[in-house]
Amino acid sequence: MTETTTHSDDSDCSTADSDGEVAREIAIVSFERKRETAEEIKTGLADEYDRIDILEYHGEVFEEHWGAYDCFVGLMASGIAMRKTAPLLDDKWADPAVVVVDEELTWAIPLTGGHHGANQVAHDLSTMGAVPAMTTASEAAGKQGVESRAKALDTHVVNGDSTVATNLAVLNDELGPVARLDGPKAVLVDDDVTVLKRNAEDGVVLGTGSVSGAGAEQFLTAWHDALDAADCATEDVEFVATATRKEGEEGLIEAARKLGVGVAYLDKETLLEFEGPTPSRSKELIGWPGIAEASAIAAGRDHELLVEKRRHDDAVTVAVGR
């Protein structure tokens, strides 16, 4: 069983999927008089997105470009954006997300598509000083919705309608960890079961452990060293996997954010099932297997260990799984 999280919050722009849950191409819609602020936003977010265009506002600008971008950032009053985009809305799984922001970059307000890019963009705007006013129930309650869990695992939701029930379960603290089912198998699910499917056809998982308080740069150095040993690049990483007892490690979360991937937290029972070959004192002391290898094996699509545990700075351990 697997608990999942994204980086330091519930959103990220680094992982594409087939259901539009992540925004990679955005358009800033702005009046000409606000062009300077639009350019500031474009520059501020340039490293986070594949494409950012600035579109000058006119009455049909949203309609003309609807479907060409994952998310529209309206540099305008929310009422204008609402009136112009409302007639265009059809399906939350297909519609682009819409966020509005004021000229002073005080507020970033997701209007539609909160779980499909708007919350992500609003959060990224917070790095420029804007307060993200997220109203989706799970985020408003400080919890991680199903779509966010999917992003963390580099997966997408197959049956979108199911998320109404599963996100309600998240809100009520009734949804357990993401359960992995290896095939080939035929599975019959109810309407309140959300099915996730991996985005990539291949890739690797970084299994990692650490001493408490390890820094982001220590994690990154260890991860890059292990990837070099596996003859892999950062683009090959699907996500980072570790133990549930490592939840809240700020250095780990920050390192994953910088690498542009999510973090999956695996429980003790899962790690014991996929214990690695390298002896670990933690098994003797606290009953947990070595986190790095067990996480890499358990989370990898083939349960295969590519690189055995490596240690960096006596602070971070890492293994590579597939």
Image (cartoon, rainbow, N blue to C red):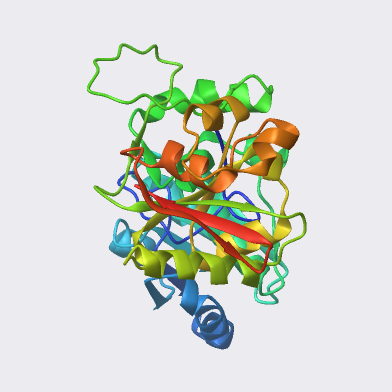
Residue 151 point in image, percent of width and height: 46, 46
Identity of the residue drawn at 58% across and 62% down: 311
Q: Position of residue 155 (x, y in %)?
A: 38, 42
Q: Is residue 203 above or below residue 315?
A: above
Residue 260 appears anywhere in the view:
yes
Which of 97/276 is in front?
276
Q: Is residue 177 above or below residue 149?
A: above
Q: Is 134 left or right of 222, judged from the image as shown?
A: right
Image position of 155 with respect to 258: above or below: above
- The residue lying toward the viewer, choosing from 202 and 46, is 202
Q: Position of residue 192 (x, y in %)?
A: 46, 16
Residue at x 49% of width, y 53% of height: 83
Check the image and name the residue furthest to the bottom.
Answer: 36
Q: Is residue 143 visible?
A: no
Which quadrant holds residue 102?
bottom right
Kindly identify the residue that appears in the image at 74 percent across and 36 percent down: 285
Figure check: 5 above or below 33: above
Where, by quadrant of the figure, is residue 196 drawn?
top left
| Figure label count | 0
Q: Which residue occupies the foreground of this view, 265 or 227?
A: 227
| Residue found 50% across the figure and 29% down from its top | 178
Percent from the top left, x then y, of residue 259? 50, 66
Residue found at the very far right of the displayed protein: 213
